[in-house]
Image: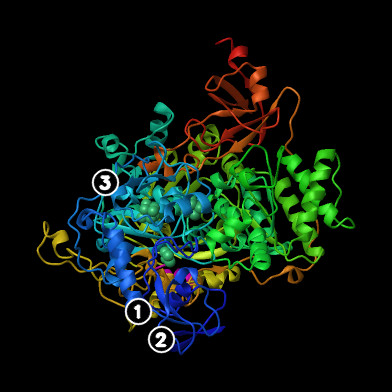
Amino acid sequence: MITVYIDNVPYEVKENQNLLQASLSLGFNLPYFCWHPALHSVGACRQCAVKLFKDENDTRGRIVMGCMTAATDGIRYSVEDPEAKGFRGNVTEWLMLNHPHDCPICDEGGECHLQDMTIMSGHNYRRTRFKKRTHLNQNLGPFLNHEMNRCIQCYRCVRFYRDYAGGRDLDVFSAHDEVYFGRFEEGPLESPFSGNLVEICPTGVFTDKTFKEHPVRKWDLQTAPSICTQCGLGCNTIAGERYGTLRRVLNRYNSSVNRYFLCDRGRYGYDFVNHPDRLREPILRTREFARVAADSDGTAGPAGPDVVDGMDGAKMLGRSLEGVVEVTNRVRAIVEGSAKVIGIGSPKASVESNYALRNFVGVENFSTGMPAREHRLNALVAKILSETCGRTVSLAEIEQADAVFVLGEDAVNVAPLLEMALRQSVRTTPDATAEAQLHIPDWDDRAVREAVQAKKGPMFVATPFAVSLDDFAVKSYRGTPDDIAILANAVAHLIDPENAPAPEHLGELERALAETIAGSLGLATKPLVVSGTSLRSESVLEAASNVLTALGKAGKDAGVFLTVAEANSLGNALLGGLDLDEVMSQVAEGEADTLIIMENDLFGRMDASKAEFLLQKAEHVIVLDYLKNRTSDLAEIVVPVATFAESTGTLVNNEGRAQRFYEIMNPDEVVKASWKWVGLFANPHYDGQIVWDSFDYVLDTIARQMPLLAPIKQIAPSAASTKGGLRVPRESHRYSGRTAMTANLSVHEPMPPQDGDSPLSYTMEGRRSNVPPALVSRLWAPHWNSVQSLTRFQEEVDGPLRGGDPGIKVIGNTDNKTTSKGSPDYFTDSEESFHTEEGKFLVLPGYHIYGSEPTSVLSKAVAGRATKGYIGLSEADAAERRLNEGDRIDITIDERSLSLPYRPITGLPKGVCVVPVGTEGVGYLAIPALGDLVGAEERGTR
Ligand code: SF4
Ligand code: SF4
Ligand code: FES
């Protein structure tokens, strides 16, 4: 710690900061624009002026930029000096010369950094009467609205987009005295992180275009802390609602997870909550009716009211308590009359919902809802994180890695923010060199970049085809999953030649590369191994584990980061259970006669013919879901459940971090969390009282019955913790129209909904200061209305949240360093192996950020960017078949045939093809597998 004197008062601050950081950490109101805690300083806006004094005798001082001046021990400066304040006011006035007077209709209004800084710098009155400079705006696609007249030329947008996130299609253009921030020509911004411009831009130039579809003033949003459910990383979010519609998703800072950013899938994929296909009332069908309806067209059964009404054998139960009682009693009757009930959970559903179902049907009758291969892979990830050498690192820690080996992951399409974190990690070594040799502090962004130029730290990427990581990797390797596993095992063997198994069939190229990788990892102080389940290859995951084991045995403090596919894949894996293949055989053999399927469309987990067989063969099928889908269409009973936005629960992310999400909007009597519905089913004599009657009770039960998951109780204060105290309001202190909102129904203000499951309230009143970090969903502090008020919630600028970042690791704790994990063994024999075969194609899964995830594509904005199904081949294979891009080709895998357009895939080995799973026209595919490919030539259709 060092001492700085601000306006002659001594303060202790951390070293290696600039004056702006130090001042903000101490709570001073010092205005700024171009500085950002993740982007650091460039000194572009001149807004953060302070007066610097030589010593205590210096009364004159000089104006310096706070963000460009190092805070050194004993330094004296003034924030309140009249000349410094006047300077800041003048700068604001210049910046505002061309800024339009459109705050009342600007989407940024009310949480605008420019509004805040204008007032803070004392520029309260506009003197200028000249015409303002104007620009044409661009259509930047479905995610962002562009209003260039509001620009104050702080350069944050391009620094984030290009320097930090690696985008190329947004830039600054200038002609004489005008600068323009936009694309070379109109068109969707290409970066999958473009939505962060909404929060990066301090004015209303870049605003959320999806929010414009259902606009509302920001202070009128009802908000709650939430977790993104659209990949396995568990980014923290703040979601906002008004009039029962989910309106937007913003980043929620967590210094260990997503820090300041979200990807565009996570930010814009929320609209499925408002989708017309939401199930909002229970449906009862006779079993025969469900079967016949399914047979009639093979795809959609009777789900919508238009189809159900007037048809014998099906009825909608409406949105009433009577309907809840009727469906509950019907489920009870089926369960009591069944020989064996299997509960199929889901890696998309919360720990609580999965646990409730497991409790209800019995441990031995619970299924994770995953096909056998994916089930095994998730369990393997849990095993590696718990047992293998290697510290499970967070997304934030990835940025500090000084040598990285990526095995098999197309990060940007599988776990998007992983890509952004890896992008920062390659700067670790060169940045440290700049600091050590040239004494450039790391916050001096422009100087560091000038010194570093294009130098990169060692990152090695081994994937079947070219991926965005290649842009900043020092070496990339292309091969099948088996080739990748062989390369990684060779690396492990080079690091630990005594114990690590030596791979057979190692080519010369692979041997040389393995030596380079092993050398880099061996020299690093924070080596990192990144892999995951996306290639669906056990051998790749096991080889990654072998590298970690070798590094651990060599005494290295190695980090591991493994991706999983869904928001609660790991939580689901920790519960364990049957896989779907085992469920299939039990139903096929008549051992089990009833299925309860929770938040899991089986047509997304297995071939359609198998899913249909399973659902037809079972005597009774009960589905709990929030969206109509092919599984719910075939169900005898459909129970409408809450999405993440209407329920409270816990998700365990890919690193084993359990995190809580809260109801943003009030569920009603009918649409409730799956765990609540299952609680109703569990009560043999339902009379309005339920067995699992509160979230706290559910958590207590889980903690008692499954000690591994006991820490999830500590993630956040319990609902009971508010007894006798104040709740945390979901509504802002400026929330308006509370009485008027329902005046069309009654002029009396209705009683606010009661939330017995969390310490949050559905009101404006309650606790607003010292709110525990897990409950913060509104960034506001006196003088700070924008997201920049975050510094008021951090222990220090860019540090953890005051009170600690929310979330607790339930496995792979960061303090279980290599030594405390004992001496794990190497994996030697992988059960499955995937390689090419003469006359066949090895079909591998591909992914797309927009298109592969089933809920986000229901949002109109994401759907507009979604990739449709294709068959990807190497250009060499395509040339042999004289294929042009877009030509239709057929592939047959087992008995499933697909006919899709051809797309060239850079880097793909010969004899290998890629099909993007989950995309339109593909759906589920049991791959990797060998397939037969028929091109247009062979078909004779050219
Ligand atoms: S568009 Fe926004 S972020 Fe970019 S320079 Fe202008 S004000 Fe700054
Ligand atoms: S990286 Fe994953 S968890 Fe994070 S915002 Fe994107 S989809 Fe959501
Ligand atoms: S914030 Fe210091 S010059 Fe812009």
Instruction: Point out the stretch of residues depicted in magenta.
Output: 692-700
Q: Position of residue 728 (x, y in %)?
A: 33, 74
Residue tagged 2: 59
Tell me which amino acid carries mark 1: Ser
Q: Nearer the viewer, mark 3 or mark 2?
A: 2
Is residue 404 or residue 154 the one in the foreground?
Answer: 154
User: Where 147 falls versus 37 (above or below)?
Assistant: above
Q: Residue at x 31, y 57 (%)?
A: 325
Q: Nearer the viewer, residue 285 or 273?
A: 273
Magenta span contains residue 210 = no
Q: Is residue 912 left or right of residue 678?
A: right
Instruction: Choose top left, top right, bottom left or bottom right for residue 758.
Output: bottom left
Q: Identify which amino acid the numbered label 3 is placed on.
A: Thr
Q: Say few, some or many: other residues with alpha carbon within 10 Å of mark 3 (under 14 / 14 to 19 / 20 or more).
A: some
Q: Residues within 10 Å of mark 1 (few under 14, many from 20)?
A: few
Nearer to us: label 3 or label 1:
3
Secondary element at image label 1 = loop
Q: In the rendered structure, which amino acid carries the disc numbered 2? A: Thr
Residue 603 sits above or below residue 891 on the image: below
Q: Give the mark, 3 or 2, whose residue is nearer the N terminus.
A: 2
Q: Which residue, given by chain and number where applicable, does mark 1 sit on?
A: 769
The alpha-carbon separation of the residues under discs 3 and 2 comes to 43 Å
Tag 3 residue: 134
